[in-house]
């Protein structure tokens, strides 16, 4: 059975119960944008129903454009992520790591309208599901109690950052931990010996959780972390953000292949070094 999602927008009491066309339609557009994965070009959200009666209500259904049939299975994961995160915000929590980072600004626009022009936004993700409601108080709590401390912490962490660029650092693992609650590796940089915290992406954190072992830390395995490099005013890397991790495997060296018994020209090692110091070679 195709999934149909109903979205309702109610006006704010502060606006004398007046709901503008711009607020109502843009709120609906942004909501279904959250449910859209641009990487999947085969799915679109069909407008199943819209009512201009108070409250403004619309309903969408996912359609596979290859067959023009319902595409419930293709959107199930994204819908569950959005539903779970809207419920988290309604409970006074932040978006979790599964929420698409490229959609975070869209979600915040929805919440921001709930403090200016829109009194309540309600999403019903299936016929049997409990509706998720976002009110003025919910949105205000998100920005004041959830979002603001995170933004403040970000400003503190990166206050000394002079520039940012995509790149990579190589080094040996000092420890595995968190950098202000974000999964990270503490590396000793190969070229400078400086220690740098490298925050890893959610995908990399999940992968490392299954692949990395304590022995990798104890043996100070060498890795390359690629992500956004944050530099200080002296050009030193302060921190790596949203990194991916790759091991650098050291090649075994066969000493027999690089040994040169004729290197000293028949002299003993001590004789060769004495003559070298006296500049007797290469005259």
Image (cartoon, helix red, strand yellow):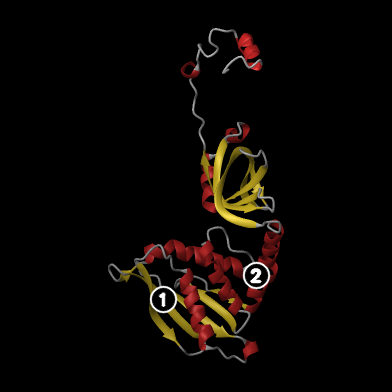
Q: Position of residue 80 (x, y in %)?
A: 48, 64
In the rendered structure, which disc, 1 or 2, sits on the residue that comes first in sequence?
1
Residue shown at the point (58%, 34%) measured from the top left:
221
Closest to the observer, 243 or 126 = 243
Closest to the observer, 2 or 211 = 211
Q: Does residue 45 show up?
A: yes
Read off the residue under disc 1: 60
- How far apart marks 1 and 2 lie (CA) works out to 27 Å
Closest to the observer, 92 or 40 = 40
Q: Looking at the picture, does residue 32 appear above or below residue 22? A: above
Residue shown at the point (40%, 62%) measured from the top left:
39
Q: Where is residue 143 in the image (x, y as percent from the top left)?
A: 66, 71
Read off the residue under disc 2: 142
Q: Does residue 243 show up?
A: no
Residue pushed farthest front?
A: 283
Q: Where is residue 166 in the image (x, y as percent from the top left)?
A: 55, 53
Locate residue 13: give its quadrant.
Answer: bottom right
Locate residue 191: give its quadrant.
Answer: top right
Residue pushed farthest left?
A: 67
Q: In which quarter of the image is the C terminus?
A: top right
Q: What element carries label 1?
A: strand
Locate residue 109: give its quadrant.
Answer: bottom right
Categorize mark 2 by other alpha carbons within 10 Å: few (<14), some (14-19), many (20+).
Answer: many
């Amino acid at each position: 059975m195709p999934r149909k999602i109903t979205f309702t927008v109610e006006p704010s009491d502060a606006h004398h119960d007046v709901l503008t066309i711009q607020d109502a339609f843009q709120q609906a557009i942004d909501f279904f944008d959250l449910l859209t994965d641009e990487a999947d070009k085969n799915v679109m959200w069909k407008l199943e129903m819209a009512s201009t009666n108070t409250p403004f209500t619309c309903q969408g259904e996912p359609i596979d454009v290859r067959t023009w049939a319902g595409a419930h299975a293709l959107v199930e994961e994204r819908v569950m992520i959005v539903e779970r995160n809207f419920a988290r915000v309604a409970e006074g929590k932040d978006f979790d790591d599964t929420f698409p980072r490229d959609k975070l600004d869209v979600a915040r626009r929805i919440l921001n309208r709930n403090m200016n022009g829109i009194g309540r936004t309600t999403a019903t993700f299936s016929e049997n599901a409990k509706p998720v409601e976002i009110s003025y108080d919910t949105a205000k709590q998100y920005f004041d109690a959830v979002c603001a401390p995170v933004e403040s912490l970000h400003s503190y962490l990166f206050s000394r950052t002079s520039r940012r660029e995509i790149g990579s650092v190589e080094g040996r693992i000092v420890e595995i931990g968190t950098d202000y609650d974000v999964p990270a590796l503490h590396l000793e940089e190969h070229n400078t010996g400086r220690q740098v915290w490298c925050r890893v992406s959610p995908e990399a954190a999940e992968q490392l959780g299954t692949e990395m072992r304590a022995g990798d830390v104890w043996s100070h395995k060498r890795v390359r972390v690629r992500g956004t490099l944050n530099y200080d005013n002296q050009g030193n890397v302060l921190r790596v953000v949203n990194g991916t991790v790759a091991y650098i495997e050291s090649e075994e060296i066969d000493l027999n292949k690089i040994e040169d018994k004729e290197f000293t020209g028949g002299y003993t090692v001590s004789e060769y070094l004495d003559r070298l110091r006296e500049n007797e070679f290469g005259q």
